[in-house]
Amino acid sequence: MITARSAADLRARVREWRTRENRIAFVPTMGNLHAGHMRLVRRARTTADRVVVSIFVNPMQFGRGEDFASYPRTLEADSAALMEADADLLFVPDVEVVYPRDLEQMTRVEVPALGTILCGASRPGHFAGVTTVVAKLFNLVQPDSAVFGEKDYQQLVIIRRMVEDLSIPISIEGIPTVREPDGLAMSSRNRYLEPRERSIAPGLYQALCEAGDRLGAGERDYGAVEQAARETLIRAGFEPDYVSIRRATDLEPPMSDDKVLRVLAAAWLGGARLIDNIEVTIS
């Protein structure tokens, strides 16, 4: 596996692959890789001749008081895992490579409306940071496809909208959430959980599943289902940020004829903000 730190080295390798008519798949990450990331890489491996993975802890998507400085950085272990997963190139740029000017002076890419609801309401500016860095990485790598996990479902929907609106010729694939045996969605931030909190954490997924069961049984008072899930989380020891039932395609509030929904939630447990979602198909 090749490791590139500069845009010039990355582009030189991509140019070489393009002369061979290689298809390129891309998996952008912030590192501290776990089995969920590895599934993305393995999926990319099945769809392309070459797989590029980036590790970049993006300062633009962290708000004031968030964990940018303490976000886990495990490059040596990540590199070994990617070699085992048969990635072709690891792109590890310094901040100056991605943002050559102060963040406040950098051009930004924003998806209005979608970027200001749900997690966007709680983390103002977060998704502008996500779409800006993903657009930049797409321009640097110029892949044919990119693979993202569905755990960050709002992010996935936003990136699909950005690609559509800007006519970026990249196919975006979402991969189902990878979970621990007890149901907790795998996340780099799970390491912030204390042992007691870790035992409680699967309750987020359980509350979503209970909401999904109520929808599947025919309940259509979405507000009541959301409130019941919030109360379940509070009883379990969470501090809910939101529980919301949305149309899966665009995260709009569901209409009476919508059949494919997403139940999304974010909740604090100690010092960790956990997010999760499930898909529900109703008849």
Image (cartoon, rainbow, N blue to C red):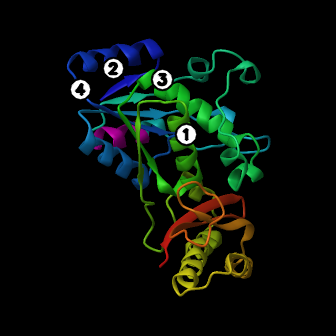
**Which residue in the rendered view is the most extreme toward the front?**
257
Residue type, mark 1 in image: Arg
Q: Give the image location of residue 153, x and y in percent.
A: 54, 55
Q: Is residue 252 above or below residue 238?
A: above
Query: Which sits earlier in the primary sequence, circle 4 or circle 3?
Result: 4
Q: Which mark is residue 73?
A: 1
Q: Residue at x 74, y 48 (%)?
A: 123
Label count reads 4
Q: Which mark is residue 27?
A: none
Image side of residue 106 versus residue 188, left or right: right
How many residues crowd around disc 4 within 10 Å: few (fewer than 14), some, or many (20 or more)?
some
Residue at label 4? 22
Residue type, mark 3 in image: Asn
Disc 1 and disc 3: Cα gap in Å?
Answer: 24 Å
Res 128 quadrant in image: top right
Disc 4 and disc 3: Cα gap in Å?
Answer: 17 Å
Residue at label 3? 139
How many residues crowd around disc 1 within 10 Å: few (fewer than 14), some, or many (20 or more)?
some
Q: Is residue 245 above or below residue 212?
A: above
- In magenta, the rendered stretch is 77-85
